[in-house]
Image (cartoon, grey):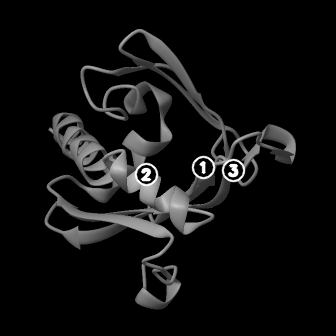
Amino acid sequence: MKAEDLPEFDPELDLVLVRELAAPRAVIWDCWTKPEHLVHWFVPRPHRVTACHLDLRVGGACNTTFDVEGNVMENRGVYLEVVPQERLVFTDTYTEGWKPAAEPFMTAIVTFEDLGGGRTRYTAVARHRNAETAKTHAEMGFQEGWGTVATQLEAYAQGLAR
């Protein structure tokens, strides 16, 4: 992934998490793109993913259902860009068939950079439609929540890489 391929950061609209993960890029990619792996790490524990449907193509579904303290939360969206082992872009602005979502929240840009030696630079950008939504997401605990999930991803991926 070249720097010029990355989206320009807008501090008013974007929240960013960057981590260096001790797991190979191919394994991290599989964890993001295969439901049987994603369900193990995608939400902070003790919450859990109860359903996951990923149609890994532009316009394909990116749907997850979570159980958060007994409350069911659905996150329905589509992929906007899929570059194998390099970048995933998905949004909840649209659902399958490019149907506009009732309450869109963000677009995610996730990049995976091979650092060699079984390490991956993992960058997750949550891009919002306005500063108010970005502020709300930050106050909801973006850094803590997405950071916890990145730690869970790393631990799960390390288990697969063995």
55 relative position to 17: left or right: right
Mark 3 vs mark 2, foreground winner is: 2
Residue 62: percent from the left, percent from the top?
Answer: 62, 39
- Residue 87, image x, y percentages: 49, 64
- What is the distance, in whole Å, between disc 3 and disc 1 at their CAs? 21 Å
Q: What residue is pinned by disc 1?
A: 105
Q: Circle 3 is placed at which residue position? A: 57
In the image, what residue type sits under mark 2?
His
Q: Earlier in the sequence, mark 1 or mark 2?
A: 1
Quarter occupied by the C terminus: top left
Name the element at disc 1.
loop
Q: Name the residue rendered at 20%, 52% in the picture.
A: 23
Task: Please name the amino acid that badge 1 sits on.
Answer: Phe
Task: Estimate the spatial distance between the alpha carbons at disc 1 and disc 2, rounded to whole Å.
Answer: 9 Å
Q: Quadrant of the N terminus?
A: bottom left
Given the current orientation, which residue lies at the most extreme top position?
70
The three-letter code of the residue at mark 3 reads: Arg
> Horizontal and vertical percent for residue 44?
28, 32
Name above or below for residue 139 compared with residue 7.
above
Count residues near mark 1 (Cα–Cα under 10 Å), then give few for <14, some for 14-19, many for 20+.
some
The furthest residue to the bottom: 4
